[in-house]
Image (spheres, coloured by chain):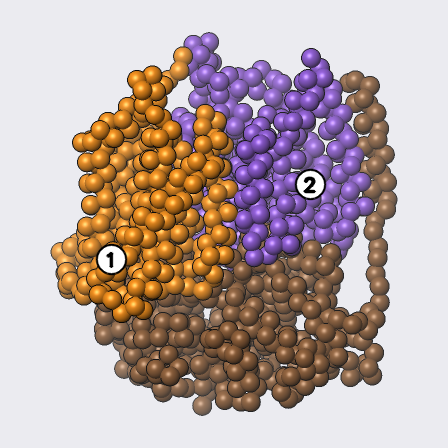
Amino acid sequence: MSTLLVIGVDGLVFASWLFLVSVGLSLIYGVLRILNVAHGSLFAVGAYAGASLVVAYTQGGLWPPGTFLMLLAAALASGLLLGPAMERGVLWWTYGREPVLQLLVTFSVFLILEDATKLVWGVSPYYAYQPYQLLGQVRVGGVDYPAYSFLLLAVAAASGGGLWWLIRRTRFGRVVVAVIHDPEMSVALGVNLSRVYVATFALGAVLAALGGAFTAPMISVVPGIGVEVIVLAFAVVVVGGLGSLEGAAVGALLIGLVRAAAVHLLPVLELFTIYLVMAAVLLVRPMGLFGRVEARRI
Amino acid sequence: MGGSTRWGAVIAVGLAVVGVLAFPHTWAGPVRPAEVKVGIVTFLSGAAAAPFGIPARNAAEVLIEELNAGRTPAPYQTRGIGGATIRPVVIDEAGGAEKQVAEFRRLVLEERVDLVIGYISSADCLAVAPVAEELRALLVLFDCGTNRIFEERSYRYVFRTHGHQILDNVGAARYVLRLKPEVASIAGINQNYAWGQDSWSTFRDSMRKLKPDVRVVAEQFPRLFAGEYSAELSALLAARPDVVHTSFWGGDLESFLIQSMPRRIHERSTLVLTTGDTVLPRLGQQVPPGVVIGARGPHGALAPNVPLNRWFREVYARRFNVRPVYPSYHISQAILGVKYAYEKALAANRGAWPTKEQVAAALRGATFETPSGTIRMALGNGHQAVEGVAYGITSRYNSATGEMELTRVLSLPAECVNPPEGISSEDWIARGFVGAKCP
Amino acid sequence: MTHRTRAVAWAALGLLALAGTLLPRWLVFLLALALAKGLAVLSVAVLMGAGLVSFGQGLFFAAAAYAAGFAMRGWALREALLLLPLGAGVAVVLGAVVGLLVARYRDIFFAMLTLALSMVLYGVLIKAYAVTGGSDGIRIPAPTVLGLQLSGDDARLLVYYLALASTAACAWAVSRYGASGFGYLAQAVRDNEVRVAYLGASPNRTVYATYLLSAALCGLGGVLTALNVGHVDPGLSYWTTSGELVFVAVLGGTGSVLGPLAGAVVYELIRSYAFKYAPYAWQMMLGAAMLLIILFIPGGLWSPVQRLWRRQAA
């Protein structure tokens, strides 16, 4: 019984992290139809920015819970800086081209940003564990969990809920939905497509950086962390259905729980879980759990 | 076929014939050079750069500068290598084995380096070593851990100047049993690739040999560079082992420690970190007390208190504001071993510049001094070094050094933690460490 | 294939044959590696011809390379002319099974499913330590060609000419395929699947067959890479390897047979010089070079050549 409880909590903790690092990818795909490989570098930049802000803030000896605000600020700053720059500077040139071309453009950007972060932050690791340890522990099923894990859960829920509200309840959201369904018609109705694109991409970039910033306190921030995130995020959004917000949440939950079960019950399978879940879901539901079947051209 | 095509075909066949007939052949005898060009291959990008690649490159940089200036203490006072300036050519180890094989060929054939010191990844070591043999190029492996290299085949031109993973994990098992003779259950969390798998099976099998009633209660293998170990930590906490072994390194080890602190796993189990020394200067107080720390041999905080080590630590720390860690020591062993071999060959050659074969002969079976103490090339027909190993346990934080202090340090000699010549590591452990001499 | 393409192909073959003896040995090795990878890139391009992007060609690349490795170690089979068909055969058999699953998929779903399956192979190779040597991989001895056993430089040169001959043969075969009814059918699937179905052909069956062809090509590339490098490890099956193949295919241009091969050579050269001149920022150099090529020559490196010809022909 307590094993099941622990598996559930572990799965939930991992799922909330997965959701946080993949929801931006799903959003950008949903609107721009671009699979953004540079998502990984935005994650890394967010982590570096978050870590260095926390380090600077802590050295100043200020009010400790302020470090959470620093993480948030880092995510906003790096996402709002890099997102529009990437969209206007590079992606803008590729609209209407083949999807694979767009994907490779983002891959090139990923390679460039990978070394750029190294030039800015060097190769030595950054640590920002202060926020991680600030909240103490929670005991569940005889096992201590850092309360930070549950904060992460809250952050994931807040960003998911916020995004849902933005898309379903605001004017901006209605425009975005219109663009998703029919870009041409939206333009005919007076939607400024390029503004929607840059805003969405910026938002997706902020979410990627947010995932990085809130990951920073629990890891050692070193070069190469970005690449690890890409495939995880891809897997989550493909399982859930590309471009679907609910899908990303359910996909993250499914992968999180299966992985936690594997770790506790059959550690040999841990390496395969993500790919097995992905393959299994695609075989049963080719468009992912929440994917829409698109009309075929005749 | 059109006319142009036919002409093209004729030309192609003609060129192919010319090509096959004219094999290239160029060889020049060694003349005394003004400089010795050393290819240095180490991770400059990716996850292995920060913990291994850069500390090694830094050590190479400062050591080569000091050697070239003739400022190194005894027995290495001569300038450079036999008076010739050492010129390093540094390249990145990223890109996988196939890229590294291509780059090694380029270093040897195009850059015309006199030798290559390199490789942290075991896969790269295994892939490049046969190429060195094929090209008759001197290669000194400086950091990779697999014991397979010289146990699978023998080499003429390839050397490894540090001990392989066997000594880390046999040493860890012996240390744990001296520290806690009553240990009843063990668990492991290791990265899911050869290094992690090798390290864990060596440790587990050694423990079983040394204390047959020990139980293995958990074997976790998270993905390499996973960075998130929440579920694994829960599983380890739930299993309540006396000892948790890990060969995690770099960012993974640091992330693991950061995440394990609030979960108080160190209060339930004794953590054994075979590469723990690398994180001591970095994480400071974030390493809890009571953790068993290794350094893959007598390196870093566990290095012997000899003049060469004191000097090495000082020049390194002065330049980089942090003390050297074991990859820095490993590369210093390679560089000093090469210098030693060249100068020995030079002396044996009565001052004439030695050939690669003479240098290799001088390094074979050699014994030389390094910041890590005396290195003996005792295995693999004199191509594979043996080292002792040291372990200690963290006690209290020293604010002067910014590190946790180590107590109950135990140094085990090379004969205790390395298999003797002629027997594979696996057999040696299976047969109960035949011929091991431990204090 | 136009006359001009054929002439260029022959001239390229001649130049490459000459290159084997004239160029420095490290460059010859790099070329051999590029040609071997070129075959894998060609296999990606063949799939792209049917409108499919695979991010899991590493599956065949690694499976064939390991098959060759096991045959050499287990059965002491050293003959390259047997190893090549063996590797390709293993890849085709694997493709026949996997193809049953993936032939129904298109677009990003095809890409991700193939990626997932190649990562499963990666996991198996890492896990089956006793058999595969885990992530450290296994060593591959020098092969014989027609019973001819050479050593040192000559062995390298032999492998180079083997790679050259295989690549030339495959390039010829793929160009014949492209000009065949079958090739046109694949193209039609890319352009409009529903119409193909209305015309009475089966898109899924066409995709399946194309997938097998690409598996065979990729398998040959895998064996040649293994023979060249002398070592195989699970990295061959990792998603970055597959991604790189797609990258190079787009770089070279997928519209012709020569594009992917030229792309492979150019890519290896750029990467090698980036390693040499910018050891600390080679990824940035590579990324910038690729970005410029994709933005300014969107059809791939080969497309300006084709455009020039077309203009002259018009």
Which residue lies under the disc numbered 2?
C163
Using the image, determine if residue B82 lies above or below residue A187.
below
Residue B431 on image: x %, y %: 46, 76
Q: Nearer the viewer, residue C68 or C164?
A: C164
Quarter-wise, where is residue A143 in the image?
A: bottom left
Residue B259 on image: x %, y %: 29, 64
- Determine whether, in the image, residue B179 is placed left or right of residue B4: left
Which residue lies under the disc numbered 1?
A68
Q: Secondary structure at mark 2?
A: helix
Quarter-wise, where is residue C100 in the image?
A: top left
Chain C shade? purple
Residue A213 on image: x %, y %: 32, 54
Give the residue at the far top of this rendering.
C199
Query: Which chain identifier belongs to the brown chain?
Result: B
- Determine whether, in the image, residue C143 is placed left or right of residue C210: right
Q: Nearer the viewer, residue C205 or B363?
A: B363
2 and 1 marks in contact (CB < 8 Å) = no
Q: What residue is rendered at 15% in x and 63% in y?
A: A139
